[in-house]
Image (cartoon, rainbow, N blue to C red):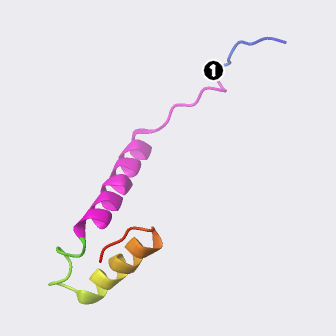
């Protein structure tokens, strides 16, 4: 049994995957830190959606 790695076994992760992961982490950070300050004046229902999402993730806000 050989321990060499073939070229087919090594796959390169595309750049768009890194960008998508970065944007998802940024969005999650903003949602957890914002407390609705950016969204409450524009659309209260969006604030409530993110507020409930914070509770679903276990983040206290009161």
Q: Position of residue 45 (x, y in %)?
A: 30, 88
Percent position (x, y) of residue 10? 60, 26
Relative depth, front residue between 30 and 13: 30
Q: Secondary structure at mark 1?
A: loop
Locate residue 16: give its quadrant. top left
Q: Image height check: is 51 above or below 16?
A: below
Residue 57 sits in quarter: bottom left
The stretch drawn in magenta includes residue 49: no
> What range is drawn magenta here?
8-34
Q: Is residue 30 magenta?
A: yes
| Residue at 25% over, 72% down | 35
Residue 48 image offset from top left, x and y in percent: 32, 84
Q: Quadrant of the N terminus?
A: top right
For image coordinates 14% across by 84% down, the residue present is 41
Near-viewer residue (47 or 20): 47
Quadrant location of the C terminus?
bottom left
Residue placed at 70% from the left, 12% from the top? 4
Viewer-proximal residue, 55 or 18?
A: 55
**Above or below 38: residue 24:** above
Residue 12 in the image: state x and y as whole percent.
Answer: 51, 31
- The vertical placement of 9 against 18, above or below, is above
Identify the residue at horizontal 39%, vertical 67% (top origin): 59
Q: Which residue is mark 1?
A: 7
């Amino acid at each position: 049994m050989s321990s060499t790695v073939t070229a087919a076994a090594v796959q390169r992760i595309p750049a768009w995957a890194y960008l998508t992961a970065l944007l998802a982490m940024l969005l999650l950070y903003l949602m957890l830190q914002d407390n609705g300050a950016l969204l409450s004046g524009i659309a209260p229902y969006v604030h409530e959606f993110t507020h409930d999402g914070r509770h679903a993730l276990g983040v206290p806000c009161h």
